[in-house]
Amino acid sequence: MGFALLGSLGSYVSVRDSHHWNVKFQSFTLKERFVVGFNLAKNFRAYKKFGRVSLCKSEFVDSEERTSPDEVRKEMEQCYELIHRLGRGVVYLGSSRMGPGHPHYSQTLELAREIANLLDCTTWTGAGPGLMDAAIKGAQEAGKAVGGFKIGKEAGEWTTSKFHPYLPSETYLTCRFFSARKHGLVDAVVRSSSSDKTAVVALPGGVGTLDEMFEILALIQLERIGSELPVPFIVMNYDSFYAKLLDFLDDCEDWGTVSKREVSSLWKICNTNSDALAYLAEFYDLPFSVNKCMEQKQEAHVNKSLKMF
C-alpha cells in the first residue's frame, strides 16, 4: 500500500507516494490557480530533462544545472585569479536598490573614495547597482583599482545581464554560483602580511546584504576566514539603519545565545564616514584628520565641477 508524503517547495507543494514521484506545482494566489503535474517514475534522473521550472502562468525561469562540482571549483578559481591580478582590498556589502537619489548613495560614494585614498587599495563589490555602484564610483574618483563579483540579476532588477554597464570586462567576474561569489568576496579581504590593508564594510541593505554580513561575521568569529592577520569589519549605521538589528543582538545576549560583548568585539559600528575613516586609520596606524578629509572632499568636488565644463 502506498503512502503520501507532503513537502513544501517555496510557494508550491510536492506530493510523493511509495511507488512513484508525482510532483505538483500549485500557485497559492487567490484569484487564479495553475497546476502542473509530471511523473518522475523510478529514476530521478528523468528530472534532468526539465531545463526550466514554471513559476507562474506566464513566467519561466532557467534553472542552473550543476552537472559536476568541478563547475563550482572552476568558478572559484576564476575568482581567486581575479583577486590575484587586481589585489586584495576593501569589500563593500550593500543594497542594490538605493540609487543615486538616496542619501546613503552619496554617503557611500564619499566613503569609498576616502577609504581608497587612505588605504591605497582595490575596492571590491558585488558589481551591482545601488550602493555597490556608489562604492565603485567613489573608488574611481580616487583613481584606484576596482574589482567585482557580479551575479546575473540583483534583487529588485527585472532583467538578467552578464555584463556591467561601464566596468571593463577584465575587472569583474559574472558568477553563476553564489558559493563562488562568496568565496571571492571573502578572499578579497584576506591579509597575509602587514602590508595588506583590507576591510569589510557593511552598508545598509536587505536580505542579501545580511546574508553576506553574517556569513563573514561567523567566519571571523570562528577564525575560519583564512586570514593570518585580523581584518577590520565596519558596519555603517547611517541614520540608525541597523539600530533594531543591534537591539536584537543585545537581546540575544540576554537570552544567552551569544556571549556578552561577543558580537561587538568582532565589528565596529560607525554612524558617520569620519568615524569609519578614523577607525581604519587607527587600525592601520595611518595619519588621518577630519580637517584633511574635508579638504580632500572639497578638492574632489571642485575637480568634478571643472570636468563638467
Image: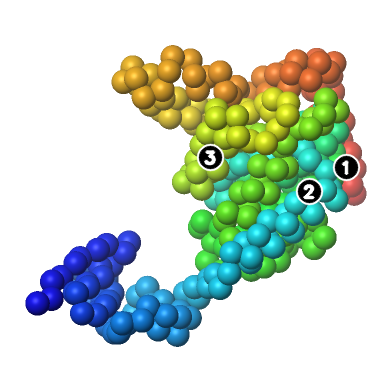
Q: Does residue 10 sit above or below 189 in this rendering?
A: below
**Mark 2 = which residue?**
83
Point out residue 23 in the picture as x, y percentages from the top left corner.
Answer: 27, 76
Task: For marks 3 and 1, give the CA distance.
Answer: 30 Å
For the residue marked with disc 1, what is the amino acid?
Gly
**Mark 3 = which residue?**
215
For residue 68, say whether it is visible: yes
Point out residue 256 in the picture as x, y percentages from the top left corner.
Answer: 34, 20
Residues tagged 2 and 3 counted as in contact (Cβ below 8 A)? no
Residue displayed at 72% across by 36% down: 190
Q: Nearer the viewer, residue 101 or 111?
A: 111
Point out residue 265 in the picture as x, y percentages from the top left corner.
Answer: 56, 18
Q: Earlier in the sequence, mark 3 or mark 1?
A: 1
Q: Does residue 124 sit above or below 302 in this rendering?
A: below
Looking at the rendering, which quadrant does residue 283 occupy?
top right
Specify few, some or many for label 2: CA neighbours under 10 Å numbering under 14, 14-19, or 20 or more: many
Which of discs 1 and 2 lies nearer the camera? The answer is 2
Task: For marks 1 and 2, give the CA distance.
Answer: 18 Å
For the residue marked with disc 3, what is the amino acid?
Glu
**Mark 1 = which residue?**
143
Which of the colour schemes (rainbow, by chain, secondary structure, one colour) is used? Answer: rainbow
Task: For marks 2 and 3, give the CA distance.
Answer: 20 Å
Looking at the rendering, which quadrant does residue 244 occupy?
top left
Specify few, some or many for label 1: CA neighbours under 10 Å numbering under 14, 14-19, or 20 or more: few
Point out residue 2 in the picture as x, y percentages from the top left corner.
Answer: 13, 76
Q: Earlier in the sequence, mark 1 or mark 2?
A: 2
